[in-house]
Image (cartoon, rainbow, N blue to C red):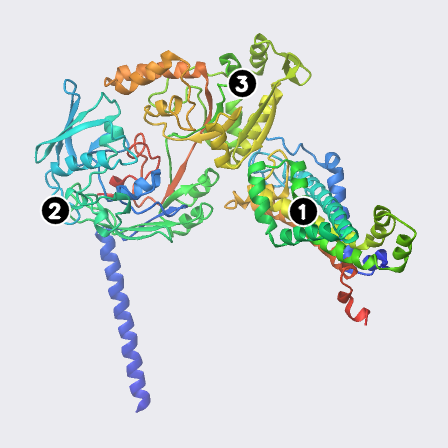
Amino acid sequence: MHINVKKEILGSGPAIIGFVILLVMIMAALLAPLIAPYDPQQQSVSSLLAPSMSHWLGTNHVGQDIWSQLLYGARTSLLVGFSVGALAVLFGSICGVSAALIGGLYERIIMRLVDSLIVIPMIIVIIVIAAYIKPNILVLIVLLSLLSWESGARIIWSQTLSLKERGYIAAARSFGARKSYLAWRHIIPALGPILLVDFIYGIRRAVFLEAGLAFLGISDPATISWGMMMRDALGFSYLNVWQWWLVPTGIALSLTIVGLTFIGHAVEPIIDPRLRGAEVA
Amino acid sequence: MKAIIWERLLFLITIGFVLVGCLLLLFTSCSRDSGEMQSYTIADNTGDWGYPSPYTHYSRGPGYIMMSFIFETLVWKDAADFVPQLASKWEYHADENAYVFRLQKDVQWHDGVSFTAEDVVFTFQYTKEHPYAWVDNTIVKSVEAVDPYTVKIYLSRPYAPFLHDVAGTQPIMPKHIWEGVDQPDQFTGPEAVIGTGPYTLADYSKGHGTYLYKPFDMYYLGKPAVEEIKVVKISAEMIPAALKGGSADAGSIPPEVVSDMKEAGLSIITAPVAWNAKMTINHKKSPLSSKKFRQALAYAIDRDALVQITQRGHAVAGSPGMVPPTSAWYNPKTPQYRYDPSLTGRLLEELGYKREGAYFSKDGKELRLELMTTAQFKDVGHFVAQQLTEAGIRIDFKTLEAKTVDAKVAAWDFNLSIYGHGGLYEPSVLNRVITGSGFNSARYDANKTLNQLLKTQITEMDPDKRKRIIFEIQELYAEELPALTLYYPQWYWAHDGNIDLYFTRDGVASGVPLPLNRMAFVK
C-alpha cells in the first residue's frame, strides 16, 4: 500500500477545512473546563434568558448556561466518536485480519457474522438495546463499537487476502513466521491507510448516532449531549429561544459531521482508487 | 356592434357580482345580529380520543369530554357546585342508604324518543353486566323506577362521593338502543351516539383525530350556543400560533406564552391544580423502610426552589399530605418538612450514619441510592439528585423508558422513582394512590390507623365529619411519607372569549381538569 496519506489530505482543500473544524472542536472539548463560564449542569432560576454578556448564548429551560453546555457537549460527542472509531477499527482489524490469515471454518463463521451484521439495521438494534440498558457513556461506547465494526472488517479482510499473497509475506511465511507475527509485523502496518479511513468514518457515524440517541431520549441524563440539547430546545420551539439554543447546537453538530466528512472524502480514494478518476488515468 | 354587446355584458356581470356581494354581506350581518356563532374550534394536540360513545371513547379525560357533548348524567357540575341535569332534584335517604332522583320531564333522545326512568334503570343494570370504565359498578346495589320520572338508587354501602363519582359521571344510555347490544365496545354505529346532550355527532375521523358536533335543537336545558363545535388536532407547539391566527378558538398553552397570549387579546384561564409529580419511595426495602429515613429525604429537597427552577414558577410546591394547598380538603396543619439539610444530617446520624467526606456511611458502607425516572422528569430528577447528593446521600440517577420504570416500580425493584398522576380533586383518590395496588399507588398499608381512616372517609356521608377525617389522613400520610409530592403543575388554556369557558369544580365528571364543560356551550 504505497499511499502517502499526508499528501492525500494536504492536496485537498475541503480536507484542510475539515481538519481545521475538527481541531477547533477538539480544542473546545479539551479546554471546556477552562473556558466554560459556568458549570453546565448547574440549574438556576434564570431560565430562558436571551444572550447577554454574562450568558453568551442565553440559558435553557432550567437556567443552565447554553454556551457552557455546548462546550461540554463537544466533549461527549468527540469522546464517544473517537472511542467508538478506535474500538470499531480494533474489532474490525482483529476479525478481518484473523479471518483472512486463519481461513477455513473460522473465516466462514466470522464472515457470515459480518454479513448478518451488515444487513441488520443498526440504529433499530441500538434503540431497542439502549432503551432497556439505558447506557451511560461507557456502555454507549461499547455498544456502538460492537455494532459498527462489520463494514471495516469486510474491507480489511479482503485487503488482507490480497496482501498475504504478496512476495515479501510469502517469503516471511517460508521462513516460518507465525500468523500473529505476520499480522503484527507486516499486515497491520500495510493496512494503515485503510484503518485510518475506517477510523474516520467510525468517528463520524458514532458522533451522529450518539446525538441521535440522545435526541430520542435514550442517553444518560447526567451526560451533556448535543442531541439532548436539541431535544430540550425543540420542546420550546414556540418561543424565540430556538435562535440561540437550537441553532448553535445544530450548527456545532453539523460542523463536526461535515468536518469529518471532508476528511473522509479526501482519504476515501485510499480504499477505492477508482474514485481518483482522472488522476489515475 | 360587437363592442357594444361586450360592454353591456361586462356591465351586467359587474352588477351581478355587486348584488351577490351585497347579499352575502347581508346574510353575514344577519347571522351575527342573531348572536349565533357559526363555528367553534378547539385545538387538541392528541387528536383521536376514540369514538365518542360510552364504551368506545378512550379511558382518559379528553375521551370522556368528547363523549360528554352527546351523553348526559343524572347530575352535573358547573364552576361552583352540582347542578341539575337529567335529574332536576335529588335527595339522600340515610335510613335506606338510597338516593332518589326526580327526572326532567321534557327530555328527548336525539332520535326523538322520550327519556324516562326506564332508561336510567336500564343503564345501571347494563353496567352491571358491562362495566363502564369510569364508574365502579359495585357501588350501586339496585335501581328502581318509582314512577316514569323518579328513580331510586340503592347503594351497596355508604359512599360519600356518590354524586361525584357515580351520578355525575355515569352517562345515561337509551334503553331502546342499547338493550340489544351484547358487545358495547364493538358498537360504533350512528345509534351508538344517540344521547340526550346538547350536541350530536356529525363527523368523527380517527385518522385525522377530528370531531364535528352539531347542535341538538330539542335540547331541554337551553339552546346550543354554536352552530358547530370542531375539535381538531394541532401540535402543542403550534396551538399558540393557531390561537393568535384565529384558526382555533380555544386550546391549552404552555405557561411561557401566557403573557404573549394576553397581549394578543386572548383570555387565559387556569385550572385548579389536580395533578402531582411525586417521588415514590421503596418503603419495603432497607434503609427506606425506616420512617425517619424517609423524613430525612424530605428535608433535603427544597420543593419551592424545585418549582422555581424546573417548572419556572408555573406550579405549586408539593404538600407532603398529597392534597394540594388550593383544595377545599387541604389541611394547613400537614407537616411540611421545610427545606433543611441539617435536619437530614441529624436524622441520619440518629439512624447510625456518619458523614465521612461528601457522603454518609454506616458500618463502612456508603449511603448510596438509585433514583430512576422517565425522560419526562429528567430535569426534576436531576434537581432532586443534586439536592440529595449535597445532603450527603450518593445518588445514581438514571432515566428509563416509561414502561420499564412502571414495571420496576410494580415489582419493587427500585429505591426512589419520580412519576406523576392526577385526580386530586375528590379525596376518594387517596385510597387508590395510598393503599391501592396499582403501580402509581404508594401501596402502603403499614399504618393501621391510616388504613382505617381511608376506609371510613369513603363511607362517611356527613361532609364535615368527612373533612375532619381527610385532614387526619393528610397528617398521618405526611408523617409516614411512603411517597413525597414534589409539585403540582399549573395548566393554562387560552381562548378568544366567544364562549365563556370555565374550569368545572373538582373537574368535569369524576375529575377531568379541562375547561370543556358542555354547559358552557349552551345558552
Disc 3 on helix, strand or loop? helix
Q: Residues within 10 Å of mark 3 (few under 14, many from 20)?
A: many
Q: Nearer the viewer, residue A238 or A114?
A: A114
Left or right for B507, reference B153: right
Left or right, B370 with respect to A255, comes to: left
**Which quadrant of the view contains residue A155?**
bottom right
Q: Looking at numbered disc 2 in the image, what kind of residue is underneath it? A: Val
Quadrant in which residue B145 is drawn: top left
Q: Nearer the viewer, residue B255 or B348?
A: B348
Q: Position of residue A139 (x, y in %)?
A: 65, 37
Image spot of residue B497 (x, y percent): 33, 43
The residue identified by callout 3 is B297
| Amino acid residing under circle 1 | Val
Kindly indicate whether the residues beneath marks 1 and 2 are on one polypeptide chain: no
Residue B516: x and y in percent read 31, 40
Identify the image quadrant of the N terminus of chain B.
bottom left
